[in-house]
Amino acid sequence: MTLDVRELLRRLQAGQKHRAIARDLGVARKTVAKYDELAHEQGLLAGPLPAVGDLDRLLSAMVADAPLPRQSFKAEKHRAKIETLRKGGVEIMAVFKRLCEEDKYQGSYSALRRYVVHLEQTAPVAFVRLETPLGEEAQVDFGSAGRMIDPRTGELRKAWVFVMTLSCSRHQYAELVFDQRVETWLRCHRHAFEAFGGVPRRIVLDNLKAAIVKASLYDPVVQRSYRQLAEHYGFLISPCRVCTPEHKGKVESGVHYVKRNFLAGRAPMTLTEANEKLAKWVAETAGLRRHGTTKQQPLVQFREQEQAALLLLPQTAYDLGVWKQVKLHPDCHVVVEGAYYSAPHRLIGARLWARTNGRDVVLYHDWERIATHPWGRPGTRRTIDDHYPPDKLAFLMATPTYCRRRAKEIGPATADTVESLFAERPLDRLRSVQSLLRLADKYGAVRLEQACTRARLYDETSPRAIARILERGLDCLPLPTTAAAATVLPGAFVFARPGSEIFPLEGGPSHGH
């Protein structure tokens, strides 16, 4: 501005006409006339023109002395009400509707918005742009990605894009997913590190739920799963302060770039196809563009400089184990992803840690492993009988399945006896089987098996008879021969008289009734 005015004064001093000056400088003739008048009043054309700095101060003083035009707003008379509403957190559109309904405001919404901006204008805030060394930092975030086709069902589902951006080279990894669950968050990190061929020393992230349970600057409660991932790969977790997305501006820009450049305008496709095209786009388009800040090609700078500065990948990939805190319910089971897993009854009501990786579920209490179960689909129940209290465990014996399994554990003779009892129809011999199996608690499984073996020689399955064998210690004697086995089992019921007296042979003497 000052240089333009000085050029105009120089031309006036040289005697150039107003029309010619206006044509050459591209200004109105009225502007030339105004400065000609001011120059004569200040005596600027009588001698050498003032230096640029002096002329600038002179022009500033002239502007300060002149009355400033005041922009008029129809909303000015409603200023007090507007300020009160805005301090209460009311949005400008809501303020506009309130003014129209309650005060018959005649202005437009855009005019009101300009007035509010004029009232609330603040001084610009300075910031420092931080540049990080090679391999030092990466920033991660999720962004909305519209809808994609689920390849398993063919249905449209809401999708998200995971982006990890290396802060030095600006090279990035991107992957489309259907959720932001902890296991997805961990898997995307592993894929990113494998794509980079190394690990940055620090990961900067927002306080998203998958990684940070409780948003806090000084003591963020990091998900146990994410902490274990960090320990495996050797990076440090660096969460941003709450409501400061500018602290991870590199990945924020990366997410927006993916959404505007790759996702915008594309028809829905399967997630698999979209990820294949996204990987190609990252390598051929995003990676080879001239970055607006670094003025370098991100992929080229990554390969030539930053990749070698990353931490080496560990020998084995991270086992995607997800930790979850669960409560042991009165039925001695916890719930993990809709399935039920037992734990010792002494911990009922306690908070336990469950770690699952899709193959098994391990339960911990106070850092001690207390149970391991094979993974089950939602609705299934995984139970270890010893986790029940003894009095409740006895109740489990009320099922034929349990009785058969327990009998097989004792031995084949016991198992055959139990099967014989269950085969007696139409009587329900479940209680008889239970009383038989309880003999193992009193005499031991070995003696019960020996007693059942002896009883089978006499074709005897009665729990009462087997109990008498154990009471008299007959199970400890050598087994009789086949001929001897035909003798009457001691204590069994026998006839006191010959059978011929009761059932006479045909044609024989008849006895009185």
Image: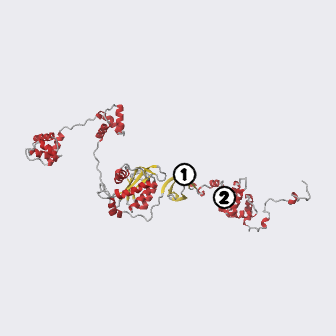
Which residue, as the protein is rendered here, is positioned at the far left?
46
Query: Would residue 238 be seen by someone viewing this image from the given angle?
Result: no
Three-letter code, disc 1: Gly
Identified at 36% across, 39% down, the residue is: 91
511 and 362: which is toward the camera: 511
Q: Which residue is mark 1?
A: 349
Does dot 2 land on a helix, a strand or a loop? helix
Return the x and y of residue 394 as percentages of the image width and height.
64, 55
In the rendered image, which quarter is residue 13 located in? top left
In the rendered image, which quarter is residue 452 located in? bottom right
Which residue, as the protein is rendered here, is positioned at the far right?
509
Return the x and y of residue 286 as percentages of the image width and height.
34, 56
Taking the image as shown, residue 2 lies to the left or right of residue 259, namely left
The number of numbered discs placed on residues in the rendered structure image is: 2
Return the x and y of residue 442 as percentages of the image width and height.
68, 60
Circle 2 packing at 10 Å, graded few (<14), some (14-19), many (20+), is some
Choose the circle earlier in sequence order: 1 or 2: 1
Q: Which residue is mark 2?
A: 404
The answer for how far apart the CA atoms under marks 1 and 2 are is 33 Å
96 and 108: which is toward the camera: 108
Return the x and y of residue 182 as percentages of the image width and height.
45, 54
Does dot 1 land on a helix, a strand or a loop? loop
393 and 166: which is toward the camera: 166
Taking the image as shown, residue 376 lies to the left or right of residue 281, namely right
Disc number for residue 153: none
Say whether marks 1 and 2 touch (CB < 8 Å).
Answer: no
